[in-house]
Amino acid sequence: MTDHAKFDKPSNPAPSNLAGVGNFPDPGQPVFHGFNPVGLWTLYMKEVRRFFKVQLQTIWAPSITTLLYLVIFTLAITGGGSNGAAHTVLGVSYASFLAPGLIAMGMLNNAFANASFGLLVGKMQGTIVDYLMPPISDLELMLALVAAAVTRAVLVGLAIYAAMFLWPGVDVSIHHPWAVVWFGLMGATLFALIGVLTSLWADKFDHNAAVTNFVIAPMAMLSGTFYVVTRLAPTFRTISEFNPVFYVISGFRFGFLGQSDIGATNDAVIVAALGLGALNAALALITYMILRSGWKLRS
């Protein structure tokens, strides 16, 4: 064999186009044709690990803040000491009346905070492609963001519940577990969806803060968390009845106390439970349609 023969091309060269060879799909052909559970789970875990990495700020700090609400309002209303037992609301002490509302409020606020952060930061830092380019659908993107926000809300709620369970003078025994689970999850889902919509609309943190201060805070504070709405004037009572958070707080409180502003039986709160589920379904559809349009994400 001559020296130059070693450099001759092989008689059967490999094809230059590797499309379809081995396990590689053809260029431009989607790998996932339907639901992508792996992608959904991956994005969900990414969002959970993001807030869990700073759990001191995202879980424990909100729990301490909520406990401060309990201490301050209990002292302000009852005066503390032996006089506290004389101040009863719905047949229980004011502290026991206040505790379920504070747990629910802490869950709602943190669900919104988590869901309104991811896409907004991605748009501001130019990393939004990390959400848009992976092989997941718009529905899977929405589900992952909402599920992560609800997970944070549940963890915060459990932390607050554990602290109040050990708090003297507070009874957090559960009378109707179904109401606690349903209204807790539906309330967290509602605020998570609002958070996703906020992150789509907002272009900077000032926009996020505006929604927090002028929408989320009034809805939470004026929902009957600290008082019974039946004691309000008729006009303000009617306004409260148009606030969906009122039904979240009252239904959640019903699960603990066995009674609430809505009523004292399962039948009395079942309409509110179904209405809250319908509201979440409608809001989820709106959120999905906006995500699918690419508004403020792909333009």
Image (cartoon, rainbow, N blue to C red):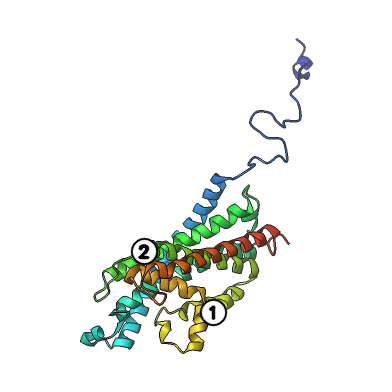
Q: Is residue 105 visible?
A: no
Dot 2: element: helix
Q: Position of residue 256 (x, y in %)?
A: 33, 69
Q: Would you identify the image quadrant in which residue 184 lies?
A: bottom left
Q: Which residue is mark 2?
A: 158
Which tag, 1 or 2, sits closer to the chain's start?
A: 2
Could you tell me which residue is drawn at 30 percent across and 76 percent down? 96
Confirm whether residue 224 shows in the render: yes
Task: Give the residue type that dot 1 points to.
Answer: Asn
**Residue located farthest toward the front when viewing the structure as drawn:** 267
Where does label 1 land, which residue?
213
Q: Nearer the viewer, residue 84 or 23?
A: 84
Q: Is residue 39 above or below residue 13?
A: below
Establish if 105 lies above or below 158: below
In this rendering, position of residue 67 left or right of residue 81: right
Mark 1: secondary structure: helix
Residue at the far left in the pictured view: 82
Quadrant location, the N terminus: top right
Return the x and y of residue 197 as percentages of the image width and height. 61, 67
Residue 140: x %, y % from top left? 58, 52
Q: Amino acid at mark 2?
A: Leu
Examine the image and state in which quarter residue 253 appears: bottom left
Which quarter of the image is occupied by the C terminus? bottom right
The answer for how far apart the CA atoms under marks 1 and 2 are is: 25 Å
Residue 103 placed where, x, y %? 38, 70
Residue contact at pointers 1 and 2, CB within 8 angstroms: no
Are there few (<14), some (14-19), or many (20+) residues within 10 Å of tag 1? few
Local packing at callout 2 (Cα closer than 10 Å; few below 14, some 14-19, many 20+) is some
Residue ID at (55%, 66%): 279
